[in-house]
Image: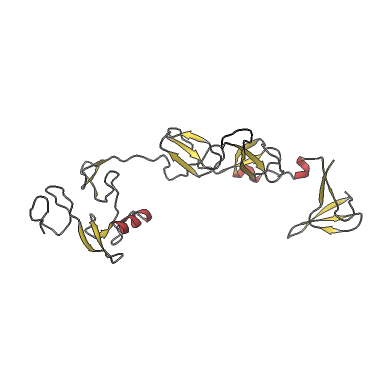
């Protein structure tokens, strides 16, 4: 096989000339998808089309034939990256020297310090990390990694059933929203929250909606009497009325 650039004989049947660095584009039958496409020769010697290589690289970063580890060049997006004797990496196609950048994740989950969410996105324009849940942001040079799982609790009822919602600004002409929180347990909005560990949360006693709001009274839906008591069963909690002896699952709630 002759190189189409320097017209010299290649020692092996590959699509890369070691003399001039010119890459040959061979149209062969891909052994993975069995279609005639332009194939790329990996360092292990297998000729695979770029579509199958990209699919294998996204899953395990390995050759789809022999499972040999491969690395993608950030400049030419090819997979012919070799490790030099000095420890540095170099791409054989575009001659780019690749510098390994240490990631700040380090096999630990990157968590937002405000809402403890792991749905973190990086904004390349501002070089900041944005949280998809509470919309908070923090700089990349600040470490917010914690091995201790935490949760956000409501300071009124000590429950962690807090949700964030977007409320539109009606008085503004633009499409702007304000973020508010709401506790599903006590029903309060814009409650004061606190981040605690799961071990600390397991020791707390969550207050009910009536304990947080003493002005709310539970009455019987049959006779409207407030002389009711709770029956704890293995399945669920039921209520019983002392006035009419009625048994029901949920009472009527009124405000004083």
Residue 203: x percent and y percent? 66, 44
Judge by depth and name the residue closer to the eye, 77 or 225: 77
Extreme residue toward the right, this view: 243
Residue positioned most to the left = 8
Taking the image as shown, residue 223 lies to the left or right of residue 111, namely right
Q: Quadrant of the N terminus?
A: bottom left
Query: Of all residues shown, which one is farthest toward the bottom?
Result: 34
Q: Which quadrant would the C terminus be assigned to in this image?
A: top right
Quarter holding residue 254: top right
**Quadrant of the image occupied by residue 159:** top right
Q: Whole-percent x and y of residue 93?
A: 21, 47
Q: Residue at x 56, y 35 (%)?
A: 174
In the figure, is residue 135 to the left or right of 159? left
Residue depicted at 84% across the width and 52% down the height: 229
Closer-to-camera residue (178/149): 178
Which residue is found at the position 32% from the left and 59% from the top? Answer: 52
Q: Is residue 126 above or below residue 19?
A: above
x and y, in percent, of residue 198 in the image: 60, 44
- Is 89 on the left-hand or right-hand side of 230? left
Quadrant location of residue 181?
top right
Colouring convention used in this rendered image of the protein = secondary structure
Q: Nearer the viewer, residue 174 or 83?
A: 174
Residue 128, image x, y percentages: 45, 35
- Position of 52 relative to 142 (above/below): below
* The one of 99 and 3 positioned closer to us in this rendering: 3
**Total residue callouts:** 0
């Amino acid at each position: 096989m002759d190189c189409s650039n320097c017209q010299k004989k290649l020692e092996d049947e590959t699509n890369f000339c070691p003399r001039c660095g010119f890459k040959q584009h061979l149209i062969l039958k891909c052994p993975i998808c069995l279609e005639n496409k332009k194939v790329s020769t990996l360092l292990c010697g297998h000729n695979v089309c770029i579509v199958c290589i990209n699919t294998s690289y996204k899953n395990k970063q390995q050759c789809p034939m022999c499972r040999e580890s491969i690395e993608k060049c950030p400049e030419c997006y090819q997979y012919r990256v070799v490790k030099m004797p000095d420890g540095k990496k170099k791409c054989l196609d575009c001659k780019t020297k690749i510098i390994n950048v240490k990631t700040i994740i380090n096999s630990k989950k990157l968590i937002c310090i405000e809402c403890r969410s792991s749905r973190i996105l990086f904004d390349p324009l501002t070089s900041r990390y944005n949280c998809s849940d509470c919309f908070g942001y923090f700089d990349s040079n600040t470490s917010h990694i914690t091995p201790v799982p935490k949760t956000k609790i409501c300071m009124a009822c000590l429950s962690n059933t807090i949700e964030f919602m977007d409320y539109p600004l009606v008085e503004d002409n633009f499409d702007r929203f304000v973020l508010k929180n709401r506790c599903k347990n006590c029903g309060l909005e814009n409650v004061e929250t606190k981040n605690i560990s799961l071990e600390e949360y397991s020791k707390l006693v969550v207050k009910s909606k009536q304990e947080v709001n003493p002005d709310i009274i539970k009455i019987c839906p049959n006779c409207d009497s407030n002389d009711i008591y709770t029956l704890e069963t293995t399945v669920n909690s039921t209520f019983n009325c002392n006035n009419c002896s009625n048994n029901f699952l949920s009472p009527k709630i009124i405000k004083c």
